[in-house]
Image (spheres, rainbow, N blue to C red):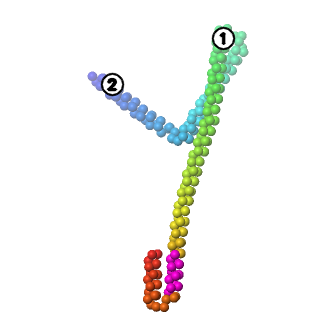
Amino acid sequence: MFRILFFLVVLGLLVWLAILFLKLRELYLKKSQPVTIADKIQSSINRCLMALNQNRLEINDIESNIEEINQQLSDASNLSPKNMEKSKQVLEGFTKEKDLRLAKSEFYQTAIKKLNLLLKNHQWAEGLEEKKNTLEGLRQHHYEDLATMEEIKYSVHAEEEYVHTIDSLSLKILDSTSLDDTKLVKEELEKIIQEL
């Protein structure tokens, strides 16, 4: 009974640890995934570069094996016909693997060129979008400037009207000969001053 209980506790603990591990792994993978399109393209370029380097290492290893087998075949006097045939088959297999790796390398090189071109075009498009936003900001500022200029123009025009009215009142006061006329001009001046 105790063994079964112990076994169930250990089994439950292992299941809990497995679930925790999977959740942490999922969280790590989400954090390590590229965020922007440029990041995704760069990530693809990096994967191609790693695969290309791996292919180069494998090609070097294959070439050294081919060279070693060719050296053994050059001294074929010691080899039995069966070993000679096996050596040729292995040599043929290595040659096919080398050709496969060379084709893969060519693919990765082409993919890297295309991805770099795509990345440059994407960066250019992003830069162009920033320039467009700057232009829109300048245009918006231009509209604000026009509104400010219209406001200033209206203000200047209104002030010109006030100055013209004050000038005409000044002329009236010069022409006035009575106290009543002077009071009327003064009241008009006070009214204009209140409007200001």
Crowd rating for badge 1 (residues with CA inside 10 Å; few <14, some 14–19, many 20+):
few
The residue that mark 1 highlights is: 85
Magenta stretch: helix, strand or loop mostly: helix
x and y percentages locating residue 118 in the rendered image: 60, 39
User: Mark 1: which amino acid?
Assistant: Glu
Residue 151 at x, y percent in the picture: 51, 67
Residue 49: percent from the left, percent from the top? Answer: 60, 34
Image quarter in which the N terminus is found: top left
Answer yes or no: do the residues labelled 1 and 2 have beta carbons within 8 Å? no
Which residue occupies the foreground of this view, 174 or 153? 174
In the depicted view, which residue is nearer to us: 83 or 168? 168
Looking at the rendering, the stretch of residues picked out in magenta corresponds to 161-173
In the image, what residue type sits under mark 2?
A: Phe
Extreme residue toward the left, this view: 1
Question: Which residue is tagged 2?
Answer: 7
Q: Is residue 76 above or below residue 38?
A: above
Residue 23: quadrant of the picture: top left
Q: Is residue 127 magenta?
A: no
